[in-house]
Amino acid sequence: MKTPKLLALLATFGAAAFFAVAADAPAPAAAAAPASYSVTLSNAHMCCGSCVKGAAAAVKGIDGVTAIGDTKAGTIAVTAPDKATAQKAVDALTGAGFFGKSSSADIKVNADTGAKADKVSSMEVDNLHLCCGKCVTAVNDILSKVPGVTANDAKTGAKSFTVSGDFSPKDVMDAFQKGGLTGKVGATKPEVKS
C-alpha cells in the first residue's frame, strides 16, 4: 500500500509549510521594545564623578529615566519613556542645580532663577550644585568675572551661599547658567547708596 508513504510525505510538507509561515509572522505586541525619548543637555557643569552621580540621583525617583553625565563632553544624556517624562527629568536636573542647552526643541530648560536686574549688596543663592571642591572653584571663577561681585562663601555641599558686593543678581545667575550651573535667588539686601 502506498497510502502510508503518501500520508508521511504530506505530513512532512505540511509541517515545513507551517514552520515557514510561523517564521514570517510578526512578533507578538508584548515582545515589542518600549518606546523611549532621549535629550542631551550640553554645556552642563560636569567636573567630576560626583557631578555624574548627582545628575543620576536628581532623576532617580522618576520611573524609567536615566541621566548619564559625561565629564569630558560636559553633557547630561537623559533617556525617558516619553517626551513628558523627559521634560520632568530635565526639570529635576535644573532643580538640583544643573543647567545646559537642550538638544530638543520640544524639551525646555527652565532658566527662571527669580533674579532681577536691580543692584544689590548681597544675595543668597539656593540649590546650586556644589558637590566638591572643583564645583566651588568653578563658582569662584564664574563670580570673579561678574562686575561688582567682591566675595562669596560657597562651600562644598552647601544648599545655599551668599554673594556680596554691588552687583546685579541677573548678571550673577546668567553667569552661572553660562557655566552650566543654576539655582534660585534667595534673600537679597538692597544696594548701599553712598
Image (spheres, rainbow, N blue to C red):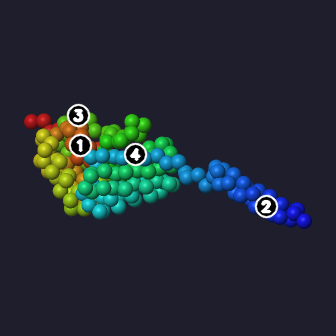
Residue flagged by tag 4: what amino acid is it? Val
Measure the C-alpha gap from mark 3 to mark 2.
Answer: 89 Å
- Residue 87 occupies quadrant: top left
- Residue drawn 83% across the image and 60% down it: 6
Q: Earlier in the sequence, mark 1 or mark 4?
A: 4
Q: Residue at x 33, y 55 (%)?
A: 69
Which residue appears at 30% of the width and 58% of the height?
51
Answer whether labels 3 and 2 touch (C-beta < 8 Å).
no
**Amino acid under label 1?**
Lys
- The residue to which callout 2 is attached is 9
Total marks shown come to 4
The quadrant in which the C terminus is found is: top left
Picture residue at 77% right of the left edge, 56% below the top: 14
Q: Which SS class for mark 3?
A: loop
Locate residue 159: give its quadrant.
bottom left
The quarter of the picture where the N terminus appears is: bottom right
Q: Residues within 10 Å of mark 1 (few under 14, many from 20)?
A: some
Work out whether mark 1 precedes mark 2 in sequence or the reverse, and give the earlier one: 2
The secondary structure type at the circle numbered 2 is helix
Residue position for label 1: 178
Name the residue that disc number 3 marks. Answer: 117
52 to the left or right of 37: left
Name the residue at the front extreme: 1
**Which corner quadrant of the image does residue 39 belong to?**
top left
Disc 1 and disc 2: Cα gap in Å?
76 Å
Number of the front mark, 2 or 4? 2
On screen, residue 178 versus residue 56, left or right, reads: left
Label 1 to label 3: alpha-carbon separation? 17 Å
- Image coordinates for residue 60, horizontal then vertical, percent: 44, 58
The Cα–Cα distance between marks 4 and 3, rounded to whole angstroms, is 31 Å
Q: Find disc 4 in the rendering and name its residue.
A: 39
